[in-house]
Structure formats: structure tokens, C-alpha cells
Amino acid sequence: MRKVHIGSVKPGEKLARPIFQENGNILLGAGMELNQRFIDRLEGLGIDMLYIDDPLTEGLEPTTAIQDNTRKAASEAIYKTMNGLMDQPVTKGRTIAPELGRTFRKVFGDIVQDLIRREEVMVSLTNIHVADSYLFQHSLNVTILAGIIGLAKGYNRMQLEELGMGALLFDIGMTRLPKEILTKTTALTASERSIMEKHTEEGFNILRAQHDISLLSAHCALQHHERFDGSGYPRKLKRDEIHEYAQIVAIADVYDALTSPRPHRRRYTPSEAIEFLFAAGNTYFQLDLIKLFCKHISIYPVATTVLLSSGQAAVVAMNDPLAVHRPIVRVIREADGSPPVSAYQIDLKNEHSLMIVKEL
């Protein structure tokens, strides 16, 4: 399979991976043959990339960070909780979701077990979702990424759980905001942004009222928009004043936001997002945490279509943790535009004259 921009998909091609709805249910399954109506509909739902079956890339399959059943259960829990809170009147000083801690402790326990069992050193987020699912899937993706950092740091079980609960629920304050702001597809005005920024304190107030959620987990909601140099909000904390859990969640939050399609901008590629994070080292985020994060993120995930400096188009076949910028690629189009006579691969680590120019 290979991952391609939806503008390059042709009628008659088949999906290699399913597309998911907001609650984790499948919208279109793997093996579905696409016609123009389906392609137009998917584009209208905000989907910009698809995994497509391709004989030249047969056998190439990116490793998923967590199992499909784990993702579905987590998506359902996040969707049910977030929508339930959106439908409740604003309340202060009391528990408004009494099952919150127990529900999400089970969800994160399953996620971390999947992460521990992974054989891959580096991870990529491979699932394709409709644009309306961003709030729900973003929380799940941030949890996966934060869990990977927590494991890499050697956190014990209690620390992992505190971090994971905070990551799963870090954006829960969004449920207290006006829906017209949450669903707006153009840039926010200054007054709207001021309202939006209140989600950190709203989330903290929700979580600290839960008897079975750690106050440190609640601080992930409060502090995930604080920045290392003191330029963040709501309290303009800096450096070690920001709890490490919140710093980890902040890095995962920004990475997933950059690499997700948004109504007001194009998505960043993983390599572009990582460049952004490194540029923000010791300004927005602690540099050591960024270095640790980037050691475990695939810059060119398997099945990514790339253009080589030779003019050839290729698909990433395998990553080497010791040479993340130089994966093994499988050529699918020669420089003159012709397909290869038979599939062959190039190990860019050994071909110093070749480099990846861009993702296609």
C-alpha cells in the first residue's frame, strides 16, 4: 500500500486502510473500490490523504501504534464523554462525570499495554478520520504520543497512569466552550480566541473535581498551553514551573495538531513538524524532551510517497532508527515518468548522492 494525497486518487483504486468516523466506527472499509462520488464525498469530509492498494507497493504496511480494538474502545469512550459533557449545563464545584476516572483508567491501561508490546522503535499515526472527529481523535493521538515519551523516560506505573489520564483528558475544557467557536472553520477573532483560551482552566476545574483523578493529571489540562519561555497561557509559567507531564502533553499536542488537516491550513508532514519542534527547543518546549520525543517518531513513515533528488518517485519501505532521514524506499516511477520494469528498493543510507526532496 501507499499513502497518497486524495487529489491523486483515481476512480477504480481500492482503499488499503479503513476510514473512521468520530466515534471510532468505520465509515469506509479496506478493500472498498473508490468511484468519483466516493472521492468527492471524502474530500468534502475534510480527508486529504488515503492509503491505496498498489501492486508495486504490495507488502508495505505501516505498523499501527495500538490495536484496532483498543483504538475503537478509546474513541468510543472519548466521544461519549465529550459529547455528554457538551450537552450538560455548565456547573462548578461538583463532579459532573462520576465515572470519568474509572472509564479512562481502563482506556489508558489498554493503550499502554499495546505500546509496551510494540516491536517498532519509532511510531507513526496511521489512521485516517473525517475532519469532524478531530477533537476526539486528537485526544487519543496525544495520549499515544505522550505514552511513548513516558515509557521512554522510564516512568513507573503510577507516573504513566497520571500522564496518560492527563493526556486523554487534557482538552476536556473544550466541552465548556460555545459550539460555534469549536466548529468555526476560519481564523478566530481576538475575543473568540480569549474565550477559547479559557478551556485550560475549564478543563482543570472539571478534572480536579473528580475524586479519582490525580491533581497532577488535572494540571495537564491547565498547563498544556504554557511555554518554556513564559509566553504561554493561562499563567505564563516558565521552565520548571510547568509540570513535566504538561510539557510532554504540550509537545504531543502541537505535533499532532501540525500533522492533522485543519480547515484554515494544510497539514505539516512529520518531517516538517519535527523541524518545527526542534526550532522551538528551549523556547516553547524543553529541548531534552523534544530530542526524546523525536527519537521515537518516524520522520518518513512506511507507505509515505516521496520524490527523490533523481526525479524518481518512491514509497518508504523501511525505517532505520539510526538513520531516520535515510529510509529504504521502493521505486514506483522512474525519472522519465515510466514505471519500473520490476519493483526494486534503494537503501538511501548507502546512496549518498540521493536524497528525499519532498513528500508527494
Image (cartoon, helix red, strand yellow):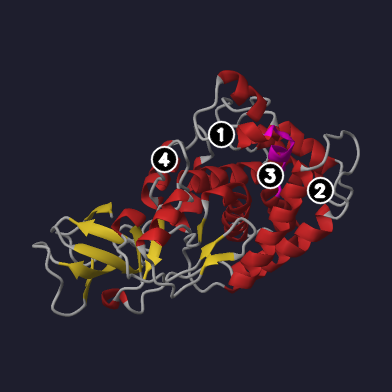
Marks 1 and 4: CB-CB under 8 Å? no
Q: Nearer the viewer, mark 2 or mark 3?
A: 3
Residue placed most toward the observer, 18 or 126: 18
- The residues colored magenta run 169-178
Estimate the spatial distance between the alpha carbons at disc 3 and disc 4, rounded to whole Å: 22 Å
Q: Which residue is mark 2?
A: 214
Q: Residues within 10 Å of mark 4 (few under 14, many from 20)?
A: some
Q: Which residue is mark 1?
A: 184
Q: Which residue is mark 3?
A: 170
Q: Nearer the viewer, mark 3 or mark 4?
A: 3
Q: Label 1 sits on what residue type?
A: Lys
Q: Residue at 76% across / 64% down in the picture?
A: 106
Q: Label 3 sits on what residue type?
A: Phe
Left or right: 230 as drawn, with respect to 326 = right
Note whether residue 321 is visible. no
Left or right: 50 as drawn, with respect to 292 = left
Q: Label 2 sits on what residue type?
A: Ser
Direction top: furthest residue: 191
Q: Residues within 10 Å of mark 1 (few under 14, many from 20)?
A: few
Q: Label 4 sits on what residue type?
A: Phe
Estimate the spatial distance between the alpha carbons at disc 1 and disc 2, rounded to whole Å: 33 Å
Q: Earlier in the sequence, mark 1 or mark 4?
A: 1
